[in-house]
Amino acid sequence: MNESGQGSATLRVFRGDATGGEGREYRVETLPGMVVLDALHQIQAEQDQTLAVRWNCKAARCGSCSAEVNGRPRLLCKARLDEFVGTIDVQPMKTFPLIKDLVTDVSFNYEVNKRIQPFTPREPGPFRIMQEDVDRVQEFRKCIECFLCQDVCHVLREHGQYSAYFGPRYMVRMAALEMHPLDMADRREQLHGDAGVQYCNITKCCEELCPEHIHITDNAIIPLKERVADVRWDPLRWAIQRVTGKS
C-alpha cells in the first residue's frame, strides 16, 4: 500500500454454473475501506462484465449479497478487504442450487415461508400489548433474510434435509408469531412435523454469523423446542389426556 492508501488484492472468484466451474483469479486496485463487493464491482467494470453477483443496497440492509468468503458465509458488503491476508476466495452459498457464478437459487426459503400460518389475531380487538412483549419479539423483526443462517445450518448444508427442516430463519419467523401475545394460532404440531424443530442440534453456528446479531438459538429455537416438549412429552399432560380423553 502506498502513501495515498492505495494497494492491491487478489480474489479467486468462482465462475461457473450448475454444470460445473472453477475459481478464477483477479487482481484489483484497492482503497481504504473497500469491501469484497466493491472489488467484484471493479472486476465487472474493468475486467469481466460477465461476472454474476447478486446485490442491491450495499448497506447490509437488503441481505442480497450473501456468499462465502474464505469458506465463511458473509455479506459481501460487510467483508472488508483489509480483514484478509493473501488471496481472497469468494464462493457462492453452498446450501442452495447454483444459478451462475455467485448467484444461487434461494426460492426454497420463500416456499417454506408460504407454509407457515401467518399472524392470526383474535377478533375483535382492542389490540393492546405490553412493552415487554414488544421487546421480546422485536429482535426477530430485525432479520434481513440474507439466508446466511440457512447456508451454515448443518441439517440443510451437510445433510440436505430440505423436506424435514425449515431452517433457522424460519424458526425465527415462527418464534415471532408464536410469542406474539395477540396471535391465536397454535403452530406447535407443525413445529414438530414438517418444520422439524427437533432436527436442530443447537450448535449456534447460525447465531454466530447473523449480521443482525439475532440470538437465533437461545431466544427462538430453544423456546420453540420447549413449547413442543410441553405438548408432546409432558407426563402430567399425557396423564390428563388419558383420563379425560381431551388434548
Image (spheres, rainbow, N blue to C red):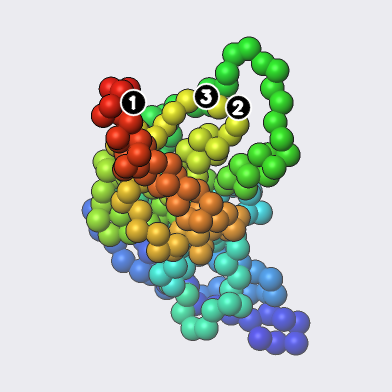
Q: Residue type at mark 3?
A: Met
**Residue 227 shown left or right of residue 127 in the figure:** left
Q: Secondary structure at mark 2?
A: loop
At label 1, counting other C-alpha atoms closer than 10 Å, the crowd grade (few under 14, some 14-19, many 20 or more) is few
Contact check, label 2 and label 3, Cβ < 8 Å: yes
Q: In 3D space, how far apart are the residues under numbered discs 1 and 2 (Cα atoms)? A: 22 Å
Q: Secondary structure at mark 3?
A: loop
Q: In the drawing, what numbered circle is on residue 116?
A: none
For the point 32% across and 42% down, the residue is: 235
Q: In this view, which residue lies farthest toward the top?
A: 124
Q: Where in the figure is residue 135, as x and y percent of width and height?
A: 68, 44
Which quadrant is home to the C terminus? top left
Q: Residue type at mark 2?
A: Leu
Q: Which residue corresponds to mark 3?
A: 184
Q: In 3D space, how far apart are the residues under numbered discs 3 and 1 (Cα atoms)? A: 17 Å
Q: Secondary structure at mark 1?
A: loop
Q: Which residue corresponds to mark 1?
A: 247
How many numbered marks have been drawn onto this rendered protein structure? 3
**In the rendered image, the vertical position of residue 10 relative to residue 169, given as above or below:** below
Q: In 3D space, how far apart are the residues under numbered discs 2 and 3 (Cα atoms)? A: 6 Å
For the point 39% across and 41% down, the residue is: 230
At label 2, counting other C-alpha atoms closer than 10 Å, the crowd grade (few under 14, some 14-19, many 20 or more) is some
Q: Where in the figure is residue 8, as x and y percent of width and height?
A: 58, 79
Which quadrant is home to the N terminus? bottom right
**In the rendered image, the vertical position of residue 64 relative to residue 89, given as above or below:** above
For the point 58% across and 77% down, the residue is: 83
Asked whether residue 185 appears in the rendered view, the answer is: yes
Q: Earlier in the sequence, mark 3 or mark 1?
A: 3
**Residue 93 shown left or right of residue 10 in the figure:** left
Q: Which residue corresponds to mark 2?
A: 182
For the point 42% across and 32% down, the residue is: 187
